[in-house]
Image (tube, grey):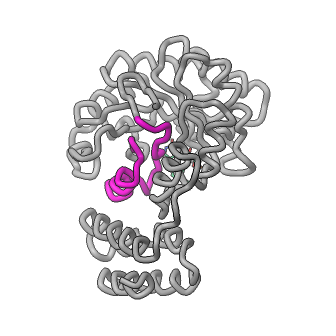
Amino acid sequence: MLKIGSIELSVPFLQAPLSGYSDYAMRRLARDFGAPLTFLGVMLAKSAANVKVLKKDIFIPREDEHPIGAQILGREPEVMAAGAKCLEGAGYDLIDLNFACPAPKVLARGRGGYLINEPEKALEIYRSVRAAVKCPVTAKLRIGYDGSAESRENFWEIAECLSAEGIDAIAIHGRYVKQRFRDASDWAILTEAKERLGGTTIIGSGDLLDAESAAKALSDSGVDGVLIARGAIGNPWIFRELRSILEGGEKCGEPSITEQGEVILRHFELVSELYDDGKAVRYMRKFLVHYCRRHVERKRVQASMLEAENGEELSAAIKRWYCL
Ligand SMILES: Cc1cc2nc3c(=O)[nH]c(=O)nc-3n(C[C@H](O)[C@H](O)[C@H](O)COP(=O)(O)O)c2cc1C
């Protein structure tokens, strides 16, 4: 069980916020395969506070996806609070504060991972968001801004203060901001975080690309939960497999070729409800390159699916290669 404030989840894993990926289609499949909570990709607090933006269908959680989290990015405490309040009003069950994003344009504006350099500002943001909403509030951190000792101290200062102030959970990606995705994620820091931050729910993130790695990270580090991120792209089965390992000690069998095809088609149908035909096919490609990894003829399947220029061609290619 994973407890995040008033939210109690039956399994200790979540689908991470994945900007550009975790739309309703990906979230729905994750839920179908056993992720107990998913996130919308990060949103600028300023946009979340804008009534016109938040009215758009893609930003409104659907009835079948609670509990669902929203994550906000910004640096002005009052804007972050306003964004959080609007997202809670729109139906989100949890607000996560992004103190982790490494994108240069985000850092240049002093947002996301940059805030690890400013513990006081990060705490001010937390306090104003906490005061603005009733739902659980969490934060996502990286383990420093750069590799320096000073930046590691800033990370600990933020994490310890958030913990002391009763934040509902802290998610930690075991790389520093400037590292982006280089080198391995440092899980020793996650172990230390759980030891040092005791009563606070700690959620680990980094390099959990398959169910076995996620199960091992959970038991080796002692964290309360893990975020599945890249490992879920074109691979919703990771949630079923992880649940199976955690419940029974063994991974369930590989999905059959027809099940794979059915899930890819279902994903494409969900995507086609969100975007027009041309965009849906183009958008789907970044998932298809991952979906076909499980196929023995991966290269040919990938080429054939990526060649499809419209929905009809893509559906036909999926049906042909996956024996539907
Ligand atoms: C395409 C992509 C989009 C991401 N978007 C977000 C985001 O919106 N918010 C966030 O906190 N982290 C985001 N992340 C980081 C992940 O949530 C996760 O912490 C990171 O990928 C490490 O986990 P992994 O190595 O298991 O993928 C993103 C990562 C990727 C690859």
Q: Which residues are the magenta region? A: 10-38
Residue 266 percent across, percent down from the top left: 32, 68
Q: In which quarter of the image is the C terminus?
A: bottom left
- Residue 23 on the magenta span: yes
Residue 216 position, x and y percent, is 65, 43
Numbered-mark total? 0
Q: Residue furthest front?
A: 248
In this rendering, does residue 49 appear at all?
no
Q: In this view, does 59 lie above or below 165?
A: below
Residue located 21% across and 44% down the image? 63
Q: Which of 177 and 215 lies nearest the eye of the viewer? A: 215
Residue 296 visible to the viewer: yes
Q: Which residue is drawn at 57% across and 84% down?
A: 297
Q: Quadrant of residue 151?
A: top right
- Say if the magenta span includes residue 319: no
Residues 262 and 311: in front is 262
Residue plotted at (64% across, 30% down):
222
Query: Which is more toward the observer, 210 or 89?
Result: 210
Give the left or right position of residue 314, taking residue 89 as reference: right
Q: Residue at x 52, y 47 (%)?
A: 228
Rendered position, 253 above or below 221: below
Among the 4 quarters of the image, the one containing residue 219: top right
The location of residue 270, given as percent across then percent down, is: 29, 64
Above or below 120: residue 84: below
Residue 159 percent location from the top left of the image: 60, 21
Q: In this view, does 103 lie to the left or right of 44?
A: right
